[in-house]
Image (spheres, coloured by chain):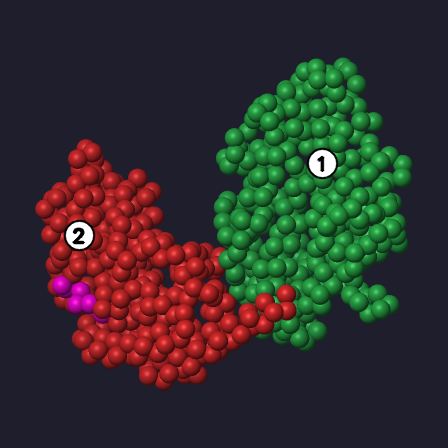
Amino acid sequence: MRVMIGMSGGVDSSVAAALLHEQGHDVVGVTMRLWGGESDTGCCSVSDVDDARRVAQQIGIEHVVFNFSDEFDEHVVQPYVEAHQQGITPNPCIECNRHLKFERLAERADELGFDAVATGHHARIGSHESGRLRLERGADLAKDQSYVLHMVTAEGLAHTSFPIGHMTKGEVRAHAARLGLRTAGKPDSQDVCFISRADGRETFLGNRIPLRTARVVDREGTQVGEVPSVEMVTLGQRRGLGVPGGGPVRYVIGVDASSDQPTVIVGDADDLLVRSQIVHSMTWVDETFEGDALAQTSAHGDPRPCHVTSIGDRQVQIDWGLRSTRIAPGQSVVLYDSTNTWVIGGGIAQHSPL
Amino acid sequence: MGVDVTSTYLDHAATTSMHPEVVDAMRPWQETHFANPSGSHRAARVTRQAVDEAREVIAASLGVNAGDVVFTGGGTESDNYAISGSVRSRGGIAVCSSIEHHAVLDPVLHHGGVTVSVTRDGQVDIDTLRQVLDGVISSGQHIAVVSVMAVNNEVGSINDIAAVAAVVREVAPEAWLHTDAVQAACWVELSQIARHVDLLSLSAHKFGGPKGVGLTVVSNGATPEPLLLGGGQERGRRSGTIDVAGAVGAATALEKTTSERDVMSQRVLSLRNELLDALVQIEGVVETVSREHTVPGIAHICLSDLDSEALLFMLDEADVYASAASACASGAMESSHVLSAIGLSAELRRGALRLSLGHSTSSRDIDRAITEITRCISLLRERRAARKQRV
């Protein structure tokens, strides 16, 4: 098989490339240049490209760099900024997978005559009894990345490979060390790759959009505090709200960034609980689904039991049964089967009324 | 894998192959005569003589005084020395064309300089240059140096340096005039350029010499501030032990280039035209700038429906080595400021392909390039159409 492997310069994709090569595939390593600006988060920097290239040399495969920075800006960075402007909490890694790795890179690979795109994600491709492909959690549950891959469809999975999905992180590092790869001990990347640690999210946003002061009010509308930038506030947040100490813990239960006078509404923990949640922009790995499932609402969050009902075009309502913590609008909600093994599909949490 | 007879190397503007006689000429100065030419013993005098002779050979090729030739560590250093050195020496700002190589453009902008727009064919418009110079001077700013490249490195367009010089001398007589002649060396009689300017940059590996050796011609009393301070070599203009083998290599290569230039240019011109004539037959292929305004060594085309990266990958697999814009530090293709400056649409800029020919290019290379480029373009289009139908 001719495989194009996305190599970020990290240990996972390094080992994924090595495994494919060991298995006898015709492998070409590709590093995508996504972010043109400054970065100190260990992603997209020249040193990462150096690592990827050196690993490819050590393995004995070709390595090229593709510049997708325009697409990254259009599909990831700009929507990220716009979401914050609207008081929404986006997930840029998911949009990057959706638009860059499994669309732009897949398209490029196809165009260049490759059979598949591989990545170093911790996830597995399995199959249903019917033979249809399905996306499964990685063997290392602590590192599982199926959540951020939920948009890959069964058709897409047919041209996708996750070579390290069956391994634990420890096994991946051990394999890299055995091969003497320079990335063996490289720390995992964690933050949003295009935001520098030194400057942070607020500076990044402030350079692109005006940050607006917001009143912090309680449910009755009485002002209890103030925040310097409404764009930085997330549902469920309880710190940095300018609320005098001593009283009960206040949580953000609503953000109104749309008006000229942005407002953050705070309440107690109970106010964050809801019975149901609407999820839009759903994609399904295979078939559409209604019924009992598990919903995961953050990259490493615990899946919660729910009941899924279709309520329109690519929209579902998920009912929690008992009341459950509201999901910040903009966050991805990924549905897994009741055994918590494979991904059914996923979408984006909508604003839910108080 | 190296560049062998089965592959088609069309990236001579990035680096051209070293002439065998250059390699031979350099070897003794690494092996046998290794002394530091600044030394005071006989071994040093031998290497010093080699440097002095190399300098004279180069000066003769350029029609300048030997004392005007400064050896540097490459084209980028030569350009930086000319721009930053002039600004630091005299104050004021630098003015350059908008299609300069980054080795000129970046120092110009770093020092708060101004750029001059170019025509659709990638040439400095003399009237525009005059207006910009007038504007800068009437705003009360002092111009330290004006820099206009002799030949553009991406599209191959030629500037009329004599005409540029006439305007600069008239409107900004105080300014030094620099030209980046790195891409001109193989194709244009350099003495015809050197006589009009105060500062001129060359890079040896672009004309059959070694990498890491540059030349700056500093004439007419120009005194840019040195970038490197130290042992005071090169009359204090460039400290650092002189690369003797590099100097000999540069001199051998430039002498050969100068003596063979006319014949080589004619031969390569007809190959280049044959290549362009064939490529423009392919649907959607656009000749980026009019070929009568370019050097023989560069064929630049654009396609509105394909990505350079994809096409270059396919060509690479077929052992045809070409390029798009300049590659950045990571190896990714950067969007070209040159193609933006000549007013090319974003679609065409994405599909840029530079095929650059050199002294070793054969007619077989051109035949293979035509066959492979044609095949790769149609294969990419077929696959794209098939994908569209599937998705």
Residue carrying label 2: B126
Magenta region, residue range: B184-192
| Chain that bears disc 2 | B
- Which tint is chain B? red
Q: Is residue B155 visible?
A: yes
Residue B386 placement (x, y as % from top left): 59, 72
Residue carrying label 1: A351
Residue drawn 84% across the image and 69% down it: A130
Mark 1 residue type: His
Q: Which of the 4 quarters of the picture holds residue A322? A: top right
For the residue labelled by badge 1, is the local secondary structure a helix, a strand or a loop?
A: loop
Give the quadrant of the C terminus of chain B.
bottom right
- Which tint is chain A? green
Nearest the eye: A93 or B23: A93
Residue B56 placement (x, y as % from top left): 16, 65
Q: Is residue B101 left or right of residue A259?
A: left
